[in-house]
Amino acid sequence: MSESAAPENLPEEVSKGKNFRTIDRSLIKQVAAEEFRSEYSLKVNVERARSKLHQICNAYRGNTRNYAELRKLIPAQIGEDRQEELRMVGESLMRYHVSTRERLPFIAAFYQEIFRRLPPIHSVLDLACGMNPAAIGWMLLAEPFRYEAHDVYSDLTDLLNEFFRVFSINGAAHQSNLLSSFPSSQVDLTLLLKTIPCLEQIKPSAGAEILEKITSPFAVVSYPIYSLSGKQKGMREQYENRFNALISTKQWEVERLLFDNEMVFLLKHR
Ligand SMILES: C[S@@+](CC[C@H](N)C(=O)[O-])C[C@H]1O[C@@H](n2cnc3c(N)ncnc32)[C@H](O)[C@@H]1O
């Protein structure tokens, strides 16, 4: 093995790629280590790591090169109808994340169905959030509330922080890797939307481990029921069985809700 193909050089090389620069370094390191094969050249190992990162992160960015460019969608100041503007800007941002965009056709029903089953929610932890915090205008949150969001992309979390600032939302978005750290904030509601299958591609026990770490009284965990290519592949049954194997019904009361392309589990701590 030549020195340049050594595993310690991999993360640096992987993160040089155009769409990999803003990904959390600890995730790049983890994926690079996982994908490294000593019999392959550095080039092949870099491709292997990037391909995995594409599946779990970059594929959801669609064609968005840099989320900083989307700041132009957020006005410098907001007008008189704040709620209307919050939804308008939120919708335009949500179009730039594939997973969040898929929820747009039923976004109002989605959050109505969830929040009408919950007591007043004053704090939210949105894990592997994508562009979902931009849906705050549809969430029936109780004032005053705080919103904490996490994802691996720094350009995405910067954009979300700008969104929070302009709309005077008590929110904070952080770049983090759920596979190596879990936020310690105490909140009323945790959201983990459509992310367990991504994380389990890197670490098969990730879903179970993350569910165990949730301490909030309520949580919403969801799964996609269509693949990114739009083809149904028996995903619902497969994911439902998988989720049932992960969740402790001694700890959580579970209610399942079905939407067009998303299966939701609403969890209440017993
Ligand atoms: C399927 S999308 C779901 C996005 C959002 N939760 C939603 O449903 O609209 C998966 C998200 O997980 C993020 N992600 C992938 N691996 C992650 C990790 N290890 N830690 C935190 N976020 C991660 C990706 O960047 C992407 O935004």
Image: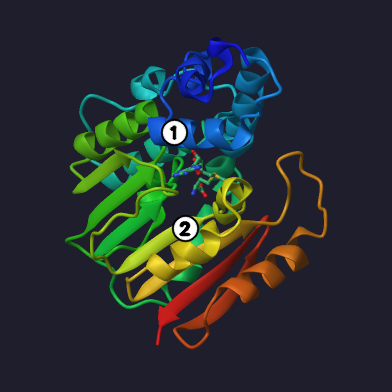
Number of other residues with Cα within 10 Å of mark 2, as a class: few under 14, some 14 to 19, many 20 or more: many
Identify the residue at image location x=33%, y=76%. 217
Task: Tell me which residue sits at (23%, 65%) in the image.
Answer: 186
Quick check: can you spot residue 112?
no
Marks 2 and 1 sit apart, C-alpha to C-alpha, by 19 Å
Q: Is residue 209 left or right of residue 78?
A: right
The disc at residue 192 is 2
77 or 178: nearer the eye?
178
Query: Considering depth in this image, is 59 or 210 the residue closer to the camera?
Result: 210
Q: Callout 2: helix, strand or loop?
A: strand
Residue 192 position, x and y percent, is 47, 58
Image quadrant assignment for residue 125: bottom left
Q: Nearer the viewer, mark 2 or mark 1?
A: 2
In the image, is residue 198 above or below residue 268? Answer: above
Q: Is residue 135 left or right of residue 163?
A: right
Q: Is residue 171 left or right of residue 257?
A: left
Numbered label attached to residue 190 = none
Mark 2 Cβ and ligand 1 under 8 Å apart? yes
Q: Residue 50, located in which quarter of the rendered image?
A: top right
Q: Nearer the viewer, residue 163 or 263?
A: 263
* Residue type marked 1: Leu
Q: How is the image coloured?
A: rainbow
Looking at the image, tell me whether mark 2 or mark 1 is earlier in sequence order. 1
Q: Amino acid at mark 2?
A: Leu
Q: Residue 24 appears in which quarter of the rendering?
A: top left
Q: Where does the image place residue 2, in percent across and percent down from the top left?
A: 60, 11
Please report the residue visible at 50 percent of the width from the left and 70 percent of the height from the top.
113
The residue beneath circle 1 is: 93
**Callout 1: SS:** helix
Figure check: 10 above or below 140:
above
Picture layout, residue 264 above or below residue 151: below
- Counting other residues with Cα less than 10 Å from the Cα at mark 1, is it few (<14), some (14-19), or many (20 or more)? many
